[in-house]
Amino acid sequence: MDEITLTRPDDWHLHVRDGALTQAVAGYSAAVFGRAIIMPNLKPPVTDVAAARAYRDRIRGVIDDASGFEPLMTLYLTDDTTPVTIAEAAACGFIQGIKLYPAGATTNSDAGVTDLARCHDALAAMAEHGLPLLVHGEVTAPDVDVFDREAAFLEERLAPLLERHPSLRVVLEHVTTARATEFVRHGPSRLAATITAHHLLLNRNDMLVGGIRPHHYCLPVLKRERDRAALLEAATSGNPKFFLGTDSAPHPRGAKVADCGCAGVFSAATAMPAYAEAFEAAGALDRLEGFASHFGPDFYGLARNTDSLTLRRHPWSVPNALPAGDDVLVPLRAGEEMAWQTVVGPQAGG
Ligand code: NCD
Ligand code: ZN
């Protein structure tokens, strides 16, 4: 198979940042994906409908209308988020989820939730209004090893949360462990998970062997090979609980290559070729469309896209860096050859 045409995919977990960085990155996603769930971890975070509307306008302002790309907005859950804010978010029509960052778990999570017990009214309102909770699933206790933080979250936090809110829909974002795939697979149908391209392609050796690779450092951190294999198995299984979310998280090279480098892999520019590579390695290219284009909208209760995207086998060299204002961004697979290319043409955006 040298060419595959899919229903146009969507990205169910994306960071496009703000200001000049949005201008540098949003177009890569808009050229390929029909929609993307936009993460709210700006500084300050996007915590109400007015801020989400203004942010959506800023994103729309830098993308080509002809792309047909639609940013699906989210709010950042805090200890103080009220049921009224949740009701307003559900009513506004352009907010598709509420994001839980445990305080201190990742980039710009300082304003995140310190204790889920403070959020039960907001969570109940989300269940009532049908707004899903999108979860960064890691505990933050200093005595829990960074490689164990996702696994600890499942039993300690997620299981009780699902039990306490029996109709709340939950997306466990960017799963990274075999344990998480099992948890989601055996959980209720209202529980789903996104999987990144980099967690399908890389394990922690790719970050730490032969020198430290800051561009492979992200959160949740890359895990063991057996975890990567389990993620690939889940993504290619045809189980609709697992769908595409790049977690493309651009940081300028100067912030990645530093004494204390930021977490995040910038994958927006190479995402679909990367997913195609992973699915092909598993002999499952025929399952890519479900994962990339069908299961996400089905879970969110949105229509599938009606336009299409073609991927062609046509080896190309990924640039070492892409411009971003005064700095550069280093994309996933920088300086390497990739087998698949997205054919960006009139079919995108229809
Ligand atoms: C993300 C970021 O930089 O905003 N970083 C990351 O490593 N994935 C935050 C997140 O999704 O955890
Ligand atoms: Zn993210």
Image (cartoon, rainbow, N blue to C red):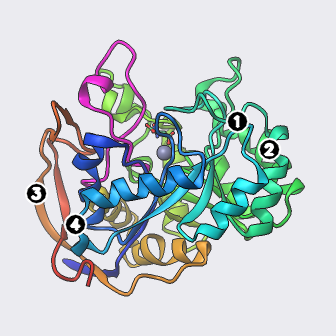
Measured as percent of width and height from the top left, residue 182 is found at: 68, 56
Relative to 2, 139 lies left or right? right
Query: Is residue 55 on the magenta stretch?
Result: no
Residue 240 vs 82, above or below: the answer is: below
First-in-chain label (2 vs 3): 2
Mark 2 surroundings: few (<14), some (14-19) or many (≥20) residues within 10 A: many
User: Three-letter amino acid code at disc 1?
Assistant: Val
Q: Residue at x 47, y 34 (%)?
A: 43
The secondary structure type at the circle numbered 3 is: strand
- Residues at discs 1 and 2 in contact (Cβ within 8 Å): yes
Residue 296 vs 88, above or below: the answer is: below
Tell me the quarter of the image containing the C terminus.
Answer: bottom left
User: Three-letter amino acid code at disc 4?
Assistant: Asp
Residue behind mark 4: 64
Residue behind mark 2: 119
User: Three-letter amino acid code at disc 3?
Assistant: Trp
Magenta portion: prevailing SS class: loop
Q: Which mark is residue 103?
A: none
Part of the protein shown in magenta: 247-270
Q: Which mark is residue 113?
A: 1
Q: Which mark is residue 316?
A: 3
Measured as percent of width and height from the top left, residue 142 is found at: 68, 18
Q: Residue at x 15, y 30 (%)?
A: 326
